[in-house]
Image (cartoon, coloured by chain):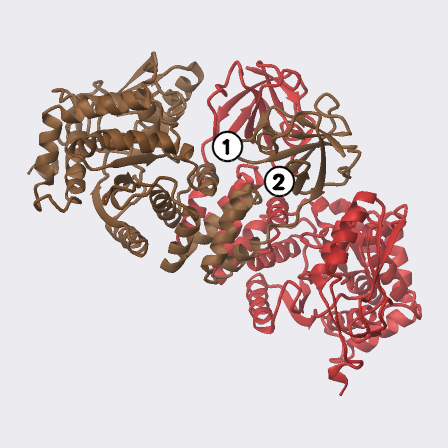
Chain colours: A red, B brown
Amino acid sequence: MLRLRRIPIDTFGENVAYIHKNCSQYKANDINVPTKVEIHGGINPVYASLVVTDDHNLLKPDEMGLGIQAFKQINMPEGADVSIAPSPPPPSIEAVRRKISGNILTPGEYKAVINDIASNRYSKMEVASFLVANGTFMTTPELLALTEALAGEENHLIWEDEDIVTDVHCVGGLPGNRTDLVVTPIIAAYGLPIPKTATRGITSSSGTIDAMEVLAKVDLSPRKVTNIVTEHKGCIAWKKTLGIAPADDILLSVEKAIGMSMQQQMIASILSSKIAAGITHLLVDIPVGAHTKVRNMPEAMKLRKNFEYVAGMLAMEIDVVVTDGSEPVGQGIGPVLEARDAMKVLRCKSDAPQDLREKSLFLAGRMLEFDPQMKGGQGYHIAREILDSGRALEMMNRIIHAQGRASPPILGHLTRDITASESGLIEEINNERISRIASLAGSPQDKGAGVDLIKKVGDTVEQGEVLYRIHASNPTDFAFANGVAEGYSGYDISRRKTATYDR
Amino acid sequence: MLRLRRIPIDTFGENVAYIHKNCSQYKANDINVPTKVEIHGGINPVYASLVVTDDHNLLKPDEMGLGIQAFKQINMPEGADVSIAPSPPPPSIEAVRRKISGNILTPGEYKAVINDIASNRYSKMEVASFLVANGTFMTTPELLALTEALAGEENHLIWEDEDIVTDVHCVGGLPGNRTDLVVTPIIAAYGLPIPKTATRGITSSSGTIDAMEVLAKVDLSPRKVTNIVTEHKGCIAWKKTLGIAPADDILLSVEKAIGMSMQQQMIASILSSKIAAGITHLLVDIPVGAHTKVRNMPEAMKLRKNFEYVAGMLAMEIDVVVTDGSEPVGQGIGPVLEARDAMKVLRCKSDAPQDLREKSLFLAGRMLEFDPQMKGGQGYHIAREILDSGRALEMMNRIIHAQGRASPPILGHLTRDITASESGLIEEINNERISRIASLAGSPQDKGAGVDLIKKVGDTVEQGEVLYRIHASNPTDFAFANGVAEGYSGYDISRRKTATYDR
């Protein structure tokens, strides 16, 4: 037996076990390849990757250390007796192998893989293998099976008295696209339930939840979500705290680490969480643009068909809209800036970003038409009425109050204006570049960091005029963001003074 | 700037950087996803995955730690000034993304990926993604491009005075298949140069180099290999120390970690190292069997065609033979036991495993026919003459002496006999099971560990008779191996007393 030690090292989503080179139980001396072990002593075995140290300060030969996450899982005090054994490969890894060889997997195989991932039996390398194997080729029945496996057996939110429970979800890739914060209060104010669950930024500079957290608490229990939606019809909650699909978090964190978003995985991830949240009617927003996640219409159509197929098999009503993803939406990129923009729209301020307002009204209009009572084509007008009358703002304040108001973070005090290197017409703003600059500035972990766009596509600028302002709080982050923005601002400016599409 | 510290933690092939939660330079507080950084201060930047600790004993806020491997790479003393910056994704990751989406990659893209992997710019997750993306689908020109990228620009071994430089390589998966140790001295004794380079066990319980290391030193410099082969015609050297294809080592270690061997990757890995070693004539051995790497003839044929295509484009003569992989070759599984079997064959002992002898003669015979002077069909007979005359043994002793004799490790003193649970005929021995038991017993890191097969397919046994003996040195390993062998021995015994194929 070895004595348990907590090793205060955070490896972000991977279980790690530490033993001494001269470990008294496990022969570590000769290990020269990554090894997986199972640790016994707690209620359930904990699976971890093994690393070896010869530092006596860190660990003695009769001790075994667990990193922060694995120590939490074993749920035993320091000093407890544990034992360690080599862990055979998770049984479902054979399915991954079969998938790589071009086979079609069964629903049972998908379930087994997802269960093993949820139990931390897959290393990050194995999770990446599963993601990529699916990413190269998946049939629609496989996609359905993966979605059902992720959704699990039971709904986490139950709406007994509602025939229609709505949600809206953007597939992402478009900076500043915080329409959720406007659409949700409009729909709730109209009277349709909308228990919106969302994630933090996955491969992007900010997600819906990062921005909502500027205004309110987002880590709500399933019970709290149910209560808030029952009373106010709407809420905007962090998906993770609902305990929906633990495997999904691991898959997302690996996608983030490899900087790749697999489309089929995204469909399964979105739809499984909507199923578990009891959603009956879903609007999906697919922005299309050269520098966003979905690059062209054929890709968007393929994605739409897949969404429709899986949702149909799961008896969920779905409306998939393809929107303009050619430049960022709104003005601010980063949680504080995005929350500011959304609140300006809800407050009907004259300087509110009009593109964010119009897109939100368009989406809300489509969602209102889920109501069988709504006369076809009236959705947009009703949505505008709700927004312009102040009822959406009032609802947003009620939702914020119900979730618990957050102490608002401050906009990053380190600022830098990026200016036009020549005069002309702004032809294009590169979403990926702007997103990267906002990320380097510290977004979304640093909520006040980001990029505030002063000019948008179609504007003309004089040389030296400000294109956008970088905000940061941390000098190192600030320097990184500035360095990248100086290399290439992300703005393409042509000498022509008017847009070609104006002619 | 931060002060450099060496953190004595071994993470096996991944560069890891450690910073304190309150790091004075890098804002670590908010990191919640795996992050890659580059460390500046040395001659070249070192790339690493970042982990965060709040343990003051391990690291102070103004220090940055590097794990054993990364510390070696930065090549600076402890206390040196270093700085740390977020590392953008390696540029070539876009090619991996394109491959996942079904695109055909160019030779330039393969080169870029392999270079970035060699510079440690890929995380293990990204390496796994590349392997799996290739594993799902690759054209033959892509396979050629990958092989050339792995081979690099220059040959590491140069043979100016030789028209024919031979080697033999088994694709693996068959325990005990140490024909290399018999074939190499036969070929060298005949007079054909054979600078054999090989690996340690990749996904198997033992490799050629693990067994050779029992007899002689295997970490030879390119210069030493050249000298030995010039003088004696043969040697058996560890591929890694030749500095051939550093990216290949990383790819192999990830394959080992995920327990998957990608066939195309294997072809590229084998042929690239042969090109770099200056081999002109190669014999490839593909064992086929239900429980080995290549499971059936169509698979073996596909593999053969691919070997022939790539070798042809690289102007290398290749002879691919498909052999019987239905049961382990020889008697011992594990470095010491395998070296013992090979030496028995070379010494023409009466108790030498006949299957190892016959297979070695068959392979050596095929290789001898690479010699244009050899009359067709004479190879086998010449090989047998060289072996039976003792010339092969004499050559092996010269090679061992030239490489440097090793202090021989001892056979594991902990033994356990696994016996037949019923009387009957041995129908099958499961290669994978036997290999797993040998691995658990400690092979190949513990050279004396392994499995000694007393009975083989076609033998009849009485209930209680010994099937095989497990050897181990470490009590924990011994217990693991026994536990698995007790569950299922790997032997399938039928009640029939004679083999069906005898009738």
Local crowd size for mark 1, using a 10 Å CA cut-off: few (<14), some (14–19), many (≥20)? some
Residue at the farthest front position: B161
Q: Nearer the viewer, mark 2 or mark 1?
A: 2
Q: Is residue B294 found left or right of A388 in the rendered image?
A: left
Look at the numbered disc 1 and give the secondary structure of its residue. Answer: loop
The residue lying toward the viewer, choosing from A231 and B134, is B134
Residue A346: percent from the left, percent from the top?
88, 65
**Disc 2 residue type (three-letter):** Asn
Taking the spot 67% from the left edge, 25% from the top edge, the residue there is B78
Looking at the image, can residue A104 be seen?
no
Local crowd size for mark 2, using a 10 Å CA cut-off: few (<14), some (14–19), many (≥20)? few
Q: Which mark is residue B196?
A: none
Residue B231: percent from the left, percent from the top?
25, 29
Chain of the residue under the numbered disc 1 shown in the image: A
Q: CA distance from mark 2 to mark 1?
A: 26 Å
The residue lying toward the viewer, choosing from B287 and B386, is B386
Taking the spot 45% from the left edge, 38% from the top edge, the residue there is B249
Residue B302: percent from the left, percent from the top?
29, 54
Q: Which residue in the structure is indicated by mark 1?
A: A34
Looking at the image, can residue B366 be seen?
yes
Chain of the residue under the numbered disc 2 shown in the image: B
Q: Which residue in the structure is indicated by mark 2?
A: B44
Give the position of the N terminus of chain A as an image quadrant.
top right
Does residue A109 sit above or below B188 in this rendering? Answer: below
Residue A436: percent from the left, percent from the top?
72, 55
Q: Is residue B40 found left or right of A419 in the rendered image?
A: left
**Disc 1 residue type (three-letter):** Pro
The residue lying toward the viewer, choosing from B190 and A365, is B190
Q: Is residue B364 found left or right of A437 in the rendered image?
A: left
Residue at the farthest left position: B503
